[in-house]
Amino acid sequence: MENFERFPLTIYNSLSRKKEAFTPINTPFVGLYVCGPTVYSEVHIGNMRSFITFDVLFRYLSHLGYKVRYVRNLTDVGHMLDDDGEDRVLKRARLEKLEPMEVVQKYSNYFHDVCKQFNLLPPSIEPTATAHIIEQIQMAQKILDQGMAYVSNGSVYFDVEAFDKKHGYGALSGRKIDELQSNSRKLDGQDEKRSPLDFALWKNAGPEHIMRWPSPWGEGFPGWHLECSVMSTKYLGETFDIHGGGMDLKFPHHECEVAQNVASSGEAPVRYWMHANMLTMNGTKMSKSLGNAISIEELINGGKFSRAFSEMSIRFFLLQAHYSSTVDISESAIEAAEKGFERLQQAWKALINMERSSGEANMELDAATKKLLDQVYVELSNDLNTPKAIAVLFDLANTVNSIKNQQIPGSSLTEETLSRLKLEFPKILEDILGLKLSSEAKSDHLDGVLELMLRMRNQARADRNFALADQIRDQLKDAGVELKDGKNGTEYELN
Amino acid sequence: MENFERFPLTIYNSLSRKKEAFTPINTPFVGLYVCGPTVYSEVHIGNMRSFITFDVLFRYLSHLGYKVRYVRNLTDVGHMLDDDGEDRVLKRARLEKLEPMEVVQKYSNYFHDVCKQFNLLPPSIEPTATAHIIEQIQMAQKILDQGMAYVSNGSVYFDVEAFDKKHGYGALSGRKIDELQSNSRKLDGQDEKRSPLDFALWKNAGPEHIMRWPSPWGEGFPGWHLECSVMSTKYLGETFDIHGGGMDLKFPHHECEVAQNVASSGEAPVRYWMHANMLTMNGTKMSKSLGNAISIEELINGGKFSRAFSEMSIRFFLLQAHYSSTVDISESAIEAAEKGFERLQQAWKALINMERSSGEANMELDAATKKLLDQVYVELSNDLNTPKAIAVLFDLANTVNSIKNQQIPGSSLTEETLSRLKLEFPKILEDILGLKLSSEAKSDHLDGVLELMLRMRNQARADRNFALADQIRDQLKDAGVELKDGKNGTEYELN
């Protein structure tokens, strides 16, 4: 029996606005597409929340026994325009006097480094927009052929009204086309578009545009939304299982994706849409354009708050909220998460060498513990409820830490349950939630041995055996450890 | 005065077969293109030799004050055919039941991990063949327009004879077209090519081919040599400064690159061609097809030789030979390099905290030391002579280690020279040669403290103070360090 049968997954589907049982098109294979970063600048911690969410989804689907093909793209052509209409990749290139692809390389490398820092698994395929220009031209042509796009001045625009008449527009975001129309600004005569709702599939490149490719409509570059429609279906099929992304991408980006795929193939591309909610700061969405984005460096190396935090504390902090809720980031909130994660790590470490002592088991506690272990998966299978799963892990950690601290007997759990706990507790933390024991934990050996050494030296001094005490100090110095005797005892410094 | 003026660089140019003064087209900018890996399987240590060579070139050019744009590609469409004519990426995909781009992603990730392990700097741009299909079609069309290619059965072939008549073929490899012709196997009637020397610019895709794109000649994929001609000139200009690659790529790959660029633009693409020689094993070239390739894992984790070696020992081993010589890899050769690198690391570490003691300087040694420091750059500027530069570093290390071991006075060098040494010795090792202090050096603290602890325990046992000896063992165990008393003394194991 596969895990996905024991703990069947439900997903809140943004399209149906309901929690639904998850059934892949072709079990055990699952196709998962997630909108990746635009690599024109450094990702910030707000961006990372979404990527961490879907990393956990990828890990959990794999744990459930699904064979997942996980596609996460890199947007390397600057579709997104600033308010002044300038392509962001190009703008950045001009500022830094770099070739646009040098900018792309720099920030792609940065993104990959950050993903490693936060312990994200690499996706199965990480396609780039510039590597799929031909396919984007082909899809634009198909939509033109279907009469749901038009050419204007060397650009190709999606005709939202024509699409709406045939297929209906706005199902994902719940927006109605007439409301959108009455809310949108009037077009001045200069605009190439027939309606303000229309969006570019292909943009005519002005002479200043460095990134440009030939097309049936002249030299240009693909529109903002087209790459995801193309790359998701190229690698996962015309209809695939799950599409994820940040909540801010639901409209217009994902709505336009649906329209493009339906217009070109007649098929709805995605069965389950999942949206990770925003990271806020004092209640405001964190974004680079608002100027309130926290950089990864500011968190990891300090600068934003009164001290630095580890990647794993931040990852844990983010997972303590459900992905569909907003999370407000603050020093005190991360600190609280850090303390909680520390408790889990204590149990994690204690379990490594824990041996059951002989004696009677507490069968009530034993049964409860087994139930709690199952409960973790039940919570995760319930629309990836990481906060509730973590709450259950805290209950389990309490039992482990109580045994470790001899508050309850070392025989409290049966051999079978203790073995299961030793196996699964770290697996849930490491393999599913993607957390690692902190590096402080790793230098424990040195700390532990040094503490022992200091105790022996103190004993020697108490015994008035100053020769031995000095010898320890000198030999430690040779090993690169300098002892400093101070008012508050002896501290050491590594050279 | 820039470093490149103080230590002017000479390069052995494979094209002229002479050592030449290096003069960039547009000082201080330097364009450097290097053929990267084909990501259809794991790179092996033979491949890495070439990448490490050009990593040092990139680092040294930057050190000299040049602004380098370093382009190294990833070949992600399987141009290279096995003997049975099957595209290698596809073949691998079939074996592993993966989508070809999943294979590409897996081995690209692997390559990037290995580059990090061996401390290679990322190139400025790392373009992929699949991201430049349009540009490859454009160049094939240009060559067709120039009458130096022909279409045959949906494929486009470069017409070597037509090219030779106009521009001359074979200058880089020194091969003559009539000799090549008489040496090449006769074509059977089925062949699409007019001459066995002709090579594909575009290949018609059979129905089994997954990786395929539309073109003016039907659906297909680019020929093996085209991507480098396209991507080098796209990012570095029609003529650029340096093109590097493994010696085995000189013919036919680089010869074909030259022909393609000259045919399409009329310009020779490259001013300095550099070729890194082969890594051999018992005198035979290491290659995957010969079955004698050593994997990175076999070296780093053990399996090939009687023990494992660190990445930095291997990097150092490779740099102890000039890039233009073959290097034969063997356990004893890496071991010798490891010992040598250890000596340099001793000096490196000693310099970190070295302070000049008061006293008279040895002005002769001082002058010699200053001269040696300059000599390192002189050697590196002499066609990247890393073995001679390393030999000079050994001389410098001798001085440092002699001071450290008090064999010569701590005042032997003047303050000025010691400061320069403290600054430049690590910079040459770390920034230019790309070496890092070994991780053993980093765990020295634990090793050192533990050795001290074991000595104290042995002393306690010699003093028949068994209570203390046992106490040490038990407390170490609490700190996660298990002692094992054996015939050869006490060993420890970290838990």
Image (spheres, coloured by chain):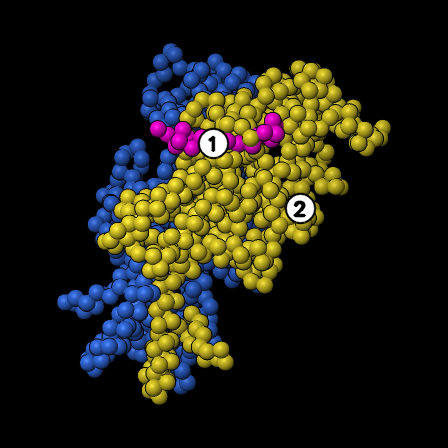
Chain colours: A blue, B yellow
Disc 1: CA contacts within 10 A as few (<14), some (14-19) or many (>=20): many
Q: Is residue B3 magenta?
A: yes
Q: On the rendered image, what quadrant is the N terminus of chain B found in?
A: top left
The residue closer to the viewer here, A17 or A282, is A282
The residue closer to the viewer here, B399 or A423, is B399
Q: Which residue appears farthest toward the top when viewing the image?
A: A189
Identified at 31% across, 52% down, the residue is: B412
In this rendering, the answer to whether B168 lies above or below A112 is above
Magenta residues span B1-18
Identified at 24% across, 45% down, the residue is: A304
In this rendering, the answer to whether B44 lies above or below A213 is below
Q: In the rendered image, is residue A284 in sight?
A: yes
Residue type indicated by callout 1: Leu
Residue carrying label 1:
B9
Q: CA distance from mark 1 to mark 2?
A: 30 Å
Image coordinates for residue A351, horizontal then vertical, percent: 40, 71
Q: Which mark is residue B391?
A: none
The lab-note entry on whether marks 1 and 2 share a chain reads yes
Image coordinates for residue A215, horizontal then vertical, percent: 55, 20
Q: Which mark is residue B285?
A: 2
Residue type indicated by callout 2: Lys
The residue closer to the viewer here, B141 or A370, is B141
Q: In the picture, residue A377 is in which quadrant?
A: bottom left
Q: Which residue appears farthest toward the right when viewing the image?
A: B189
In this rendering, the answer to whether B87 lies above or below B256 is below
Lateral position of residue B279 relative to residue A9, left or right: right
